[in-house]
Structures are given as structure tokens and as C-alpha cells.
Amino acid sequence: TRTKELTLPGFFHDVCAAAHPMGILSPYLRTLPLRDYGLEWIKPEASVAHPLDDEPAVMLWRSLERTSADLGVDAQAYRELIAPFLDRPQSLFADLMAPFGFPRRPLTMLRFGLTAIRSAQKVARGRFRGERARALFAGCAGHSIMPLEHRLTAALGLIFCVSGHLEEWPVARGGSQAISNSMAGYLRDLGGTIETGRTVQGMDDLPPAGAYLFDTSPAGLIRIAGSQLPNRYVRRLERYRYGPGVFKIDWALDGPIPWRDPNCLKASTVHLGGQLDEIATAEAAMWRGEHPERPFTLLCQQSQFDPSRAPPGMHTGYAYCHVPNGSDVDLTEAIEDQVQRFAPGFKDRILARHTMTTSAFERYNPNYSGGAITGGVADLMQLFSRPVLRWNPYTTPHPQIFMCSASTPPGGGVHGMCGYYAAKVVARRMRAPFGARLALD
């Protein structure tokens, strides 16, 4: 959650996370007075636009009825899929964003799980007859960064569709940096201190403390604390799978993106991939180590809703696609062709661009191993066993060393839940008030 002038002066780009459905729905972040510390969510009219080649874009509006009405033959099927999860949604998301355990709403979670355990491909084809609903579900499932034929990809499709009917996917006024700034301000008022500008090479670089929480990848934990951990545990960490990476572009634009369907300007996030088959083909190729000609591309247009992001009359653009881990292939042309496909004249709007390959992401943040931005693959083998299979995933064999990164449940996203649950474990173990005597790495 950082924001920088990556292209031209006065154009403020989110370096990583851009739109924040999990941030506004997070059971923990919702309890914090972050608005008092400068965080303001700006909500678009729609969460997602999914343009198609020869027809209007599919839109994910907050209204279930409005969204369903645009899905033709699948209007009723979509309502039946989504509606059961819109009752008491905070309880549902508290269950979904928790480590493995007994849920608060077991029957709702059972219903969710029976769909979530399947592949997005099978759910989309089994539930829907038309391409519009299939495309919407596939685009949301594409956030899993796995082939849509894999089990559990339906979970992301369902979560993101449901989230769009609870809150419009917001952007943070001034940039995603505002999220970090607000949390830092609150922490300081609570008496916490933050030290930056130092690389921690080993445990000797850290002050004495009752507990150490590592917001790092498993590789980072090994590098810093490996000598303090049993060899068997270290070897298990070394087998952790990070999954594909991303290639990202930020643009400075001389106007809004000229979408063929103007409704696309109403959404904070645009999924560029056409119909289900095209998205599935692209993600399967990426998983095999290939670079598809038409990559599934996720685009955000923050300046459309937050004019502070660019000079008057100007705009920023943000897009990325999934690539094989460690890839340094430049996909600028492929991504811009995807945007131009649905927004003729887009390339003429570009004033400047900034790109990041997987190696650039890893240099920026060593936790992004090989450009993997989500903390590791979240498939059946690694969803609840991240980073290794332990009764309590936030603990290590060392009684004072814990993990709280996206490589622990519930995984990647701007939601704070990994740290929340890790801190609760530490607080219980130390038998101190919540948050006491913590040294955060």
C-alpha cells in the first residue's frame, strides 16, 4: 500500500494494491478508527466492468437486481447463487477470512464450501448458460492467479462477486499509501514506534523482545531467523510454493480511458479478458510457463473517482497481468493491445508509462518472491497449510518467533487479518493484554 509519482510529476500511482474490497470489508480493519487518521474510502458506482467484444460490458453493481437484470438467461441463476450469502455478510466474511476452525455460521459456510471447492470453470459452465454471467464469474475468479480448471478457483469468483454486492470496491483518497499512513498514525497514538530504513539480516539486528512477528515470506524468515529454527522446519519452509508473478504498467494519460462502453468508466476495476474460454486459456498458459498473446488483464482507474491522483483534466491508469514466476518478459504491448481492444484510441492518450517485471517487484519488496504478490499459491495443498502444516499456522517451533504475513491464512490482500490472528496468538501465549510486548519485524 504505497503511492508514488512513477511516471510524471503530479501523477500519483499505487505501486501495488489499488482497489480495496477486502479493506473495506475486513472484520478487523472495520474496528479501527482509521478515518480519524486520514483514511477516506471513495466508492465508485460499480465495482467491476467486464467489457466484451460485440456487446455491452457486464457490470457488477452493488444492487443484485441491477446486476442480474443484465445477465439475460442467467438472471435467476445468478441471483440464486449470490443471494444466500448477502444475509449477515459480516459473519460470513469473518468466517472466510479466519484460519481453519469451526465457523460462526456453519450452515452458510457449508453452502459456500460446496461451491467454493469446485473449479471456476465448472461452476461457470454448470450454473450459467450465457457468456455474460460466465465472463463476470471468470473475471472475479481470475484473481486467484491459478488456472480456472483448478479446484478452489470458484471460491475467489464467489467471494469477489459477493463482495461487490456488499460494498463498491473503493479506492483510498490520495492513494493506497493513505491506508498505511492512517494505521501508522493510530499505532503511534497507541504508543507504538516504527523504524524504517534498516535491513534486518539476522536476529542479532533486532532488540530483545518477548516475541517477534515476521511479516515476511518463508524465504525471508529463513534468511533472518533460520539459524534459530530446527532444520526440519526450515526444509519444510523451503518447499513452500509461491506461484506465478505479475507484470504491471502504470500510465500517465491526457484524459479518461475511451472505453467503447462508457459504463466502464463507472467501475474502479475493469477485467479485460473477453469470454470465459479466453480467460481460462490465458491463465492456463501462464501456469504452464507461457505468455499468452491476450493475457487476462486487471485494470484500475483510480483517478476517475479521485481527482487528486492527477493534474486537472489528466488521469492515471494501472494494469497488470499474471506471468510465470521469475519472468522478465516485457508485456507492455500485449496489455496495451488488450486495453485498445475495448477502448479504441487508448494508446493515443498515453503521455508516459512505468513498467514493473517480476524481478522489479522482488527488488521493491523481497516478499514478492519471483514476482508473486499474493504470498503464495492458495490451492488445496496450501490454503490452510501455509506456510507449513501446523495446528497453529502463525507459530514456529521457536516459542518467540511467529509469522504474520500473506504466507499465513487467510492469504494475500489488504485486510490485516493475517496480522490480527497472529497477534492474538502471541497475546494469548504471553498472557498479556492484546498487543503488549510485541516486537514487530
Image (tube, grey):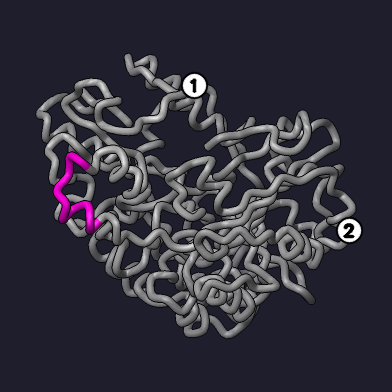
Of callouts 1 and 2, the N-terminal one: 1
Question: Are the two marked residues, 1 and 2, in contact with CB atoms closer than 8 angstroms?
Answer: no
Location of residue 205 (image quadrant): top left
Please give the label number shown on residue 54. Answer: none
The residue carrying pointer 2 sits among few (fewer than 14), some (14 to 19) or many (20 or more) residues within 10 Å by Cα, namely some
> Relative to the observer, which residue lies in front, 200 or 350?
200
| Residue bearing mark 2 | 345
Amino acid bearing label 2? Gly
Spot occupied by residue 344 in the image (x, y as percentages of width and height): 86, 62
Spatial separation of the CA atoms under disc 1 and disc 2: 40 Å
**Which stretch is magenta?**
227-236
Q: Is residue 293 above or below residue 431?
A: below
Three-letter code, disc 1: Tyr
Is 125 situated left or right of 398 in this image? right
Magenta stretch: dominant SS? helix
Query: Which is closer to the viewer, label 1 or label 2?
Result: 2
- 146 inside magenta stretch: no
Residue 124 to residue 11: above or below: below
Reply above or below: 188 against 438. Answer: above
Q: Position of residue 238 (x, y in %)?
A: 29, 57
* Nearer the observer, 388 or 125: 388
Residue at 76%, 62% in the rendered image? 333
**Location of mark 1 (residue):** 37
Tag 2 secondary structure: loop
Q: Quadrant of residue 366?
A: top left
Horizontal and vertical percent for residue 121?
Answer: 49, 79
Tell whether 381 sits left or right of 338. left
Q: Is residue 381 visible?
A: yes
Question: What residue do we see at 34% from left, 73% from top?
Answer: 117
